[in-house]
Amino acid sequence: MAFTEALLARPPEGVTYTTYIDALADGTLVERGRRPKHGAIRARDAFIFCARGIELALRRTGLLFREPYRYLTVDPDAFDLMHSHVFSLRLIGTDLPLVMSAGFPLSVLYEDRFHWSHRRVLFATWMEHLLARTFGVQVPWFPPRTAALSLVQSDHYRNSLIEAGADPQRVLVRTLAIDGVASEPRPGPPRTIGFISTDFEGKGGRVVVDAFRSLLTTHPDARLVVVGTDTLPPDLILPDGSVEWLGRVSRSEVLESVFPRIDVLVHPTRCDSGPPFVILEALQRSIPVITSDLVWIDEGLTGDGVRRVPVDTEHVSLAMADLFDADTYEDASRAAVALWESRYSMDVLAGHLGDDYNVALRPLA
């Protein structure tokens, strides 16, 4: 949703986007194979309806990942190209060029966040390949077959698709971006650490608290703000008087009230891809970031404004202490906003996407 909002706010030059929901509403996009509210299934949709029934039944067994396929017919007079982010789909009755994009494979998500066993993930991935081939569906996290281009968010992801047989010319690294205006660099010295996530454990919240406790031994006036998690884990003991636990707040409150209060964002995630949006929002506001060395995170998320470290207390604590040095902090703040301007602003991404769409509109070799 955030990616779509960013594209709508700042589309490539000459590009007009119509969202999935709007296209369904105006009839320029039709989802096939669903039972109509009134009347019988049309004969031409009978096969698709059966295919969907088989697929959904298999997914309910837990043998496959939960995300269903979509079967779509697009009005070729309404659009020149279709860009699908995350959805697995098959276009029926149209030859529109298709651009797919995804952050990382579902297999990684299910193993790291949903804690499926490695064997179960391997079997589900094999089943997904088989089903996608049988029904002619393009899965965004598989090598492109029917898609003209596949846009991924890290070199690691691109290389893994190429190793799986993808044409290198059809897989491009295109990171995420956010719209807006860059903030002035912050003078420091830093005082407040921020952790912002609704997934406290998966995004490294416990490591942040433990590392912050270590930071207090050398910076007793430091403060930590934890945002996004309603319930304090019962076994987690917070340092007295130095941690503010805000729970869930609105996105506007995070942007307008929380970010102005924090000096360093710490996001040692165990399960993420590309550049997480909360990191981009921090960089835009000249806030240096500490994050993990996860391979699925965009390799361009680096430099003096970002510390990428293993997800453990020692490394995160050392990174905090480094950024709490007054001279280091001022340089890191300048580097943080410069990184956003050069790589993660919508001006930059829109230019790349405009070029990508022109490539996709050319006939496949």
Image (cartoon, rainbow, N blue to C red):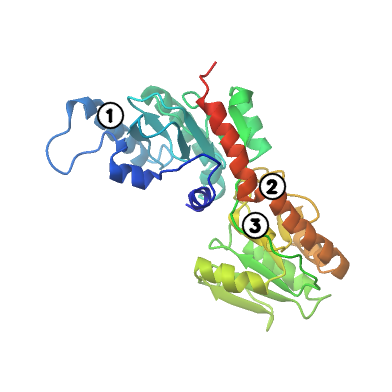
Q: Is residue 249 above or below residue 78?
A: below
Residue 121: image location, x then y, percent: 51, 38
Q: CA distance from mark 1 to mark 3?
A: 41 Å
> Do we see residue 245 in this rendering?
yes
Dot 3, how many residues are within 10 Å of its Cα: few (below 14), some (14-19), or many (20+)? many
Residue 26 in the image: state x and y as whole percent: 29, 43
Of circles 2 and 1, the one toward us is 2
In the picture, the disc for residue 132 is none
Quadrant in which the C terminus appears = top right
Residue projecting furthest to the left? 39
Q: Which residue is mark 1?
A: 48
Q: CA distance from mark 3 to mark 2?
A: 13 Å
Task: Please report the residue visible at 58 percent of the width from the left and 32 percent of the height from the top.
Answer: 356
Q: Are marks 3 and 2 in contact (CB under 8 Å)?
A: no
Label 1 residue SS: helix
Report which residue position mark 2 lands on.
Answer: 343
Callout 1 touching callout 3 (CB < 8 Å): no
Q: Residue drawn 66% across and 68% down? A: 194
Camera-side residue: 85 or 361? Answer: 361
Which amino acid is tagged 1?
A: Ile
Type of residue at label 2? Arg
Sequence order check, earlier mark of 1 and 3: 1
Q: Nearer the viewer, residue 200 or 224?
A: 224
Label 1 or label 3, whichever lies nearer to me, is 3
Residues tagged 2 and 1 counted as in contact (Cβ below 8 A): no
Q: Earlier in the sequence, mark 2 or mark 1?
A: 1
From the image, tell me which residue sits under label 3: 279
Q: Nearer the viewer, mark 3 or mark 2?
A: 2
